[in-house]
Amino acid sequence: MLASPRLASPRLASPRLASPRLARVLTGLTGAAVLAAISCSSDSSSNEVSCGTSQNGRTYTSATGARLEVSVTPGVSPSVTEEWSYRGQLFLRTTTQTSNGSHVTDVVYGAAFHGVHHAVITTADGETFSGSIDGRTFLPFRKGDAYTSMRFTDGQPFPEISVDPAAQHAIETLRSSSASCAGQPPTPVSGSAGELVMGYQNPGHTSDAAGTSLCFACQDACIDGFGICAFGVATGCTAAGPFYGICVAIGLGVCGLIAIACEVTCNFTACCPVACGSGCCLNGESCLDPSAHLCCDQGTTGCHAGNGTNEENCCKPGDVCILDGSCCQGDHTCRGNELCCAPDELCGTDSTGTQTCLLCPAQQQCFGTCCPSGESCIQSSGNCCPITSARCGGHCCPGPSYSCTGASGSDCCSDSVACGTLCCGTGQVCLDATTNTCGVCPANEAICHPPSGLDVCCAPGRVCDSQGCCAGNQLLCGNPPVCTDADLFTGGCP
């Protein structure tokens, strides 16, 4: 286990920073100290610890006047700074960051230390360390080497380093589980999801992936874990004697490396799920323009101009990216992907034989064809049909006086012979529409065709209207024509 269950997760073994071997080394350097810190509980009567949080850090302050402030500077190359103080005076400050494949810890010692003021310690693998103390370069040494064997490049031994006992004791007793500060994450900043622009242009948007609650939660875990690790180092180095200052410096540097590994992982996951130049897009989005770190919403596709302009947009599903970099509904493209016709236009050939967008009202557009004036499209079949004609199951009937018959209602049948779901044949009339019964007229009757409605059987020479056969002295008069008694004087319609 490294510093905490969270820091021991697979995400710390990110190949971008640490190899498995380095992870094992870091564990060896800090494991015993960390376990000691975790196993020791705070004595609330003498060592009450108050905790504070900020967007990038934690502070731990004890009643004895000791204080630890941890801060993580996020970014592509994050750094971790820990500053220990006692009664308002600097005790020790370390800053760890990565540079050219090496991990560098810069150490500033406070007045409580005697014999050392500043050190720079560098390691690439956690096994071999090099650097300088107060400007004097020392020879590389390996983990586990005796302090007395360490030498500067001029052959001189390391200085005797002592620490003020009261300050050291106060720092060592400042230990607490990170749980005392857990559950207090900074207020999250909502990421910009970007509203989808309706129409043919949606130029993308910037997203604040680093300001989401998911990113804060990830960074928060890194900071919490570092606190546990740092407390363990302060306690675990107690027995180091004159090596105390170097032990603490190396140990805190290792804690910093662990936190950096965690932070780098956050940068490539929760804080930057989709890289986009110098910025990041939210999870599910795609990068439209890395130079401007513009993002496209989830489900849309980036479109870039192919005509030498800088136009770019995010196209909705089903839209087509055309030459000028704008988005076009799939059925409105023309001349390949060069043109996008307006809603009242349709791609066609003009008088010069050139394919272009031609005026065609929307109601006349029919699957790439412009219906003649007075006709509209039957969407189910893609056929043009006069607006006044009846339509049955994708079919265009010859005129308005037609009904839809057949089992599926898709057959055109003249109103005069429609009989329920049947269409009566030639020489037949509808005898009973409720039972779909067609038949021929009796021998002493003939088929009468009324101006509207069903054909009926009437006596020879009789006329009929939509209600049936007229009486022998009646004529069809009026509009609509109905059975009317003839005028006594003229014999015609009154």
Image (cartoon, rainbow, N blue to C red):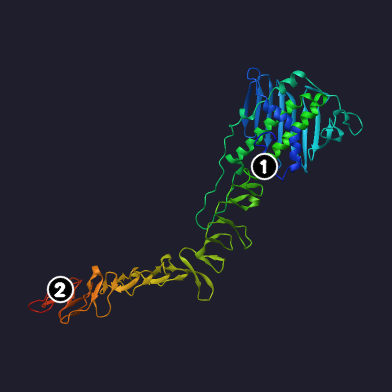
Q: Position of residue 400 (x, y in %)?
A: 30, 71
Question: Which three-letter amino acid code belongs to the residue tagged 1?
Answer: Pro
Question: Which three-letter amino acid code belongs to the residue tagged 2?
Answer: Cys
Please report the residue visible at 44 percent of the width from the left and 71 percent of the height from the top.
Answer: 370
* 173 sits left or right of 142 in the view: left
Residue 370 in the image: above or below residue 212: below
Quarter occupied by residue 119: top right
Q: Position of residue 355 (x, y in %)?
A: 53, 72
Residue 447 in the image: above or below residue 126: below
Point out the tag, 1 or 2, that comes first from the N-terminus.
1
In the picture of the structure, the residue carrying the numbered disc 1 is: 10
Is disc 2 surrounded by few (<14), some (14 to 19) or many (20+) residues within 10 Å?
Answer: many
In the picture of the structure, the residue carrying the numbered disc 2 is: 483
Q: Are marks 1 and 2 in contact (CB under 8 Å)?
A: no
Closer to the camera, 271 or 126? 126
Closer to the camera, 291 or 92? 92
Is disc 1 surrounded by few (<14), some (14 to 19) or many (20+) residues within 10 Å?
Answer: few
* 154 sits left or right of 189 in the view: right
Q: Secondary structure at mark 1?
A: helix
